[in-house]
Amino acid sequence: MDTTLQDPLVGQELDGRYRVEARIAVGGMATVYRAVDTRLDRVLALKVMHQSLASDAAFVERFIREAKSVARLAHANVVAVYDQGADGGHVYLAMEYVSGCTLRDVLRARGALHPRAALDILEPVLAALGAAHRAGFVHRDMKPENVLIGDDGRVKVADFGLVRAVDTNTSASTGSVLGTVSYLAPEQIEHGTADTRADVYACGVVLYEMLTGAKPHGGSTPAQVLYQHLNEDVPAPSALAPGVAPELDALVASATARAVEARPADAVALLSTTRAVRAVLTDDQLDAVPPQAKEDHSAGSENRTAVIPRPSAAADDQDQLNHTSRLELPPEPLRQEGHRRGGRGGRGGRGPLPRRGIVTIAAAVLLAIALGIGVWYISVGQFTEVPPVLRKTQAEAEKKLHGAGLDVKVVNEFSDVIPKGKVIGSKPGPGERVRDTGTVTIRVSQGRPRAEVPNVVGMPLAEAKRKIADQGLTVGKVTGRFSSETAQGSVLSTSPAPDSVRRPETPVSIVVSKGQPVGVPDVVGDSVDEARSTLEDEGFKVKIADEQVFSEEDKGSVAEQSPSTDDEAAKGDTVTLTVSKGVQMVEVPDVTGKNVDDAKAELEDAGFKVNVEKALLFPGDQVQDQSVKGGDEAPKGSTITIRTKGGVF
């Protein structure tokens, strides 16, 4: 049973123009139909937003943004958008109809693809994304479902519904992260933001899936997949498909680096690298059969690596026939002259040309040749195509470039992917043209980035910090420790230890000598001026606390100090002084007639100490009188004496 017959839109006409013929696919945001533009009489795809979302202004705005964004991308590998509108509760896009299948369909049918086929698909995808990136947009939802392969072999990127400007925040208003979890870059998951390198990451995952037939990260829940994206590198495809070339492993690793800055800057840069990798692969490597590949039972399939159809030999022959079967006649004056001479000579056909005609023709031929050579030299002859040198040793690369007549400049840099001593890339890139006397700059790997912790023990702190920064490291936590052997302010030790090798930007913690410990004078009870003078004479700095406290010390004198006389300190340390507000006076509760225990508890709660005096003869348990009358004030913390009823005290 055809389920499209159950769709109420099938058979309807939107906006009095688009006749809906069949349902093609259903997605999370919209349903896609095959329709006919009755005004222009052409088949197109109609993308209609789900009515449950059409009432959400944010979703409608995103839907409309897709139309405006993609309409700006005039590229052969981007699905074109023709129109956008609304008909009642139906918000729609009128788009180019691509008759064929998606890359997901191909992967389901084929399992894994030969490297040649994978690159045949990846390159036009990167070309489409490159056009978007250079126009200032990010796709943000690259996956096999959004790669369309037409029956004519054209590869197109679809569904720019999540597209955003490069410099805008890309997290959804709901707080959820847009995109499909298996292809999300770590920064999309962790921060909800993405730039062109998020699309580069997704393309790296798609390439991995084409080469192996499986996604790099799996799990029973989306949360498990997201965790792996954040904490685990995408494995090398060759681990699952042993025939994959090391260059393809490196390409996947570069595109899917968890650190954003380690990836190619955009799809254009990744496309250049991809073409360089293809150039160095042999036919055997390109046509290697992955273990996960399923047998292709398609009729007449001679090239098992071909996913994208190629023009037939018959078509090529017909083109050649059409090109060569045109009759080229000489100019009219020459034809007439030939007929005249043939008639006079009594022979059939043409007689000999006059000498002047021969000279004219020869001059024209020579001029055409000269012009051809000139055009060739201007457009091609004075240029040399840069040969591919990716992953070659420096010596091999220099020899190859010198052999092409080019000068070489070498720049060394670190790489997490390319082994030490081999070429990371070149500028201009492989296949680009450079003048014969031009220079090609090659970037040679120095291996994984590393920095050596300098020995700064005994140095003053400021000098030690400079030495650490000069090595590409950062200064971490600085702590002090007393030492009678190392001068105050000089470095005692570092962590990591000197001569250790670490990655650049690694923090180095420093322990600095505080010198020999000295005693702190006791200035509690002194006036603030006296205390300051005493401490500064001993080599300490003085700080007065913002808050004052009640204490037994006179008002305005020092109530507390930190560090105290019991603590160790070094000269130059700061001693904080807290000033006394004097004794705090508190109203004494009236506890006469109350039970002794209750009275004692009430007085202690008010901040007093309590002394209980009981009668010697027949002592009672009620308070007869108290040393300070209830309602009077007494210093907080002072002692209140209570007496019980009874005989002699």
Image: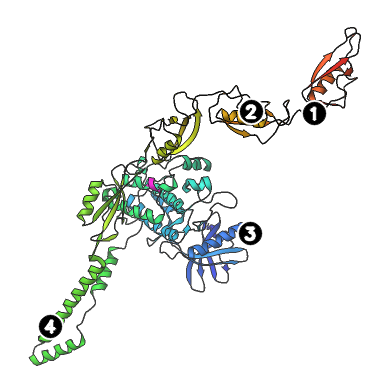
Tag 4, which secondary structure? helix
Label 1 residue SS = strand
Task: Between label 3 and label 1, give the one nearer the viewer.
Answer: 1
Query: Distance from label 3 to label 2 (Cα)?
Result: 67 Å
Q: Position of residue 27 (x, y in %)?
A: 53, 55
Residue linked to disc 1: 585
Disc marking residue 561: 2
Find disc 4 in the rendering and name its residue. 359
In the rendered view, tell whether residue 35 sits above or below residue 605.
below
Are circles 4 and 3 on residues that touch, CB within 8 Å? no
Q: How many marks?
A: 4
Q: Disc 4 or disc 3, which is closer to the eye? A: 4
Q: Horizontal placement of 444 versus 18: left or right?
A: left
Task: Residue type at mark 3: give it.
Answer: Ser
The stretch in magenta equals: 252-256
Q: Image point 28% across, 45% down: which residue?
A: 422
Q: Work out whether residue 304 can be spotted.
A: no
Where does label 3 land, which residue?
55
Q: Is residue 578 left or right of residue 188?
A: right
Mark 2–mark 4 Cα distance, whole angstroms, equals 115 Å
Q: CA distance from mark 3 to mark 1?
A: 69 Å
Q: Which one is earlier in the sequence, the residue at label 4 or at label 1?
A: 4
